[in-house]
Image (tube, rainbow, N blue to C red):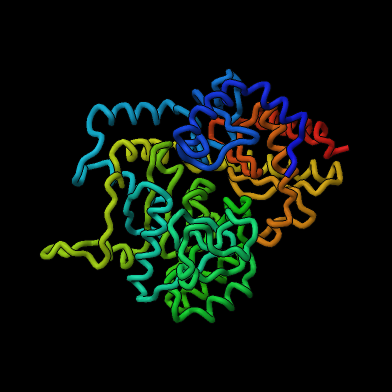
Amino acid sequence: MELNAIEVEKFRARTQRSKELWERTKEVIPTGHAGGMGYFLPHAILVERGKGCWLWDVDGNRYLDLRIGDWVLIHGHCDDDIEAAVAHQMSRLVQVGGPEWDLGYRMACLIRDRTPSVDKVRFFVSGTDANLTAVRLARVFTGRMKIAKAMGSYHGTADVLLVGTSILRDPAEMIPSGVPAWTATDVVEIPYNDPDGAEAIIEREAANLSAVFIEPVMTAMGMVEATVEFLQRVREVTARHGIVLVFDEVVTFPIAYGGGQAHFGVTPDLTTFGKAIGGGLPASAVGGRAEIMDLLEPDMHSGAAPMGVMSTFGGNQVAMAAGIATLEKLTPEVHERMNALGDRTRARIDELGRRYSIPLHSTGLGHLIGIHWAEERVVDMRTRLLDDREKIVNINLALNNEGYYQTFTGLFLLSTAIGDQEIDGFLLALERSLHTLGYAK
């Protein structure tokens, strides 16, 4: 992959201190990044502070944040209400080894009341925690061991969840480094947005399948929206065979009041939540049908549960306070405004592709936006691999030089702190970048 030399020079000139501090940090932290997802090319940008929809790096550059804390900060940076809730809780109780009287209950009710498929909720720390717990719940509930997932889907970093993810450019390379080969024998891949193909595979494997994991929008794979028919057919075949249908809404929950399942009108058995529900602090959850969730309920005499699970920081009081403040602000009206802005952004990106007769197009739903450069519209893993990655990376490099902060894979997210003025600026910058790079004539 070749980066545009002019844009690289611009980037280096405006981020010299970032480069120095990044090199220093790499001496003690691999990649120079303490956590999160990847870093920028040709080197990392080191951020100093954020407020609302804006970030400032150590060189003093300001960016519109379209990455929102690796898809977490649905209300932007340092939201006043969330900040106040966290400060109040920090002065009262930070962490307790037993049940706290109110926060977990209120947070669980907020999730349950807007998600009709959820009877009960259990809290964890990361999306990986939540999805791995859902795997175990499904196995105990059904007595079967295998799971199915869409080709290219990402559900976390546990071995069984990493098999066949979109992190790999070649879908034939099903097993990432460090994952035992035998793990793949417990994972069945189904084609995304192919109702007939998915149903046939699930039917064939039904006797051994405990769960099918689906994202209503395949996020890491390119913000690819599912079709209603695909989700409905998967729901029908799993129900027919007593297979637990798990919707991974770790990223997608904010796309509608009630998440992707509410938008599509398809009801799973279990749902996993994460990222935005913690208001910027680590929080995740599993919720679903009472008969499945009750497997976590211990016997009052022996103390043993059908399925034991522990999470030291699951339901942490400060994270719950932040989560409550976050969800209380995510009203139906707020979703409607944010989604309208997302629709307008995607429509304008598609219009740019048509205007300049280039294969630029967008995907996504609600506040989730993917930008692609492919002759065929991206709808699944096969078409995602047709993306011209070099062009997407260079577009994002040019946008970064214009003051926009996002992943270099062409994935963008809106927050409630972003308005029409910011998006108009972004779209003009995108058009300028296409001309600067010579991609639009």
Q: Residue at x 62, y 63 (%)?
A: 171
Residue 297: name its quadrant. bottom left
Visible residue check, residue 29: yes
Left or right side of 143 for 299: left
Q: Residue at x 42, y 65 (%)?
A: 269
Q: Residue at x 61, y 21 (%)?
A: 16
Which quarter of the image is occupied by the N terminus? top right
Q: Is residue 369 above or below residue 178?
A: above
Q: Is residue 152 above or below residue 440?
A: below
Residue 355 or residue 311, whichever sits in front: 311
Left or right side of 417 for 318: left
Q: Is residue 241 above or below residue 440?
A: below
Left or right side of 341 for 273: left
Residue 224: name its quadrant. bottom right
* Residue 357 % position (x, y): 86, 46
Left or right side of 374 for 230: left
* Residue 215 % position (x, y): 53, 58
Q: Residue at x 50, y 59 (%)?
A: 162
Visible residue check, residue 340: no
Residue 360 or residue 292, whichever sits in front: 360
Farthest residue, direction top: 60
* Residue 160 % position (x, y): 45, 63
* Residue 193 % position (x, y): 63, 65
Which quarter of the image is occupied by the C terminus? top right
Residue 275 or residue 221, whichever sits in front: 221
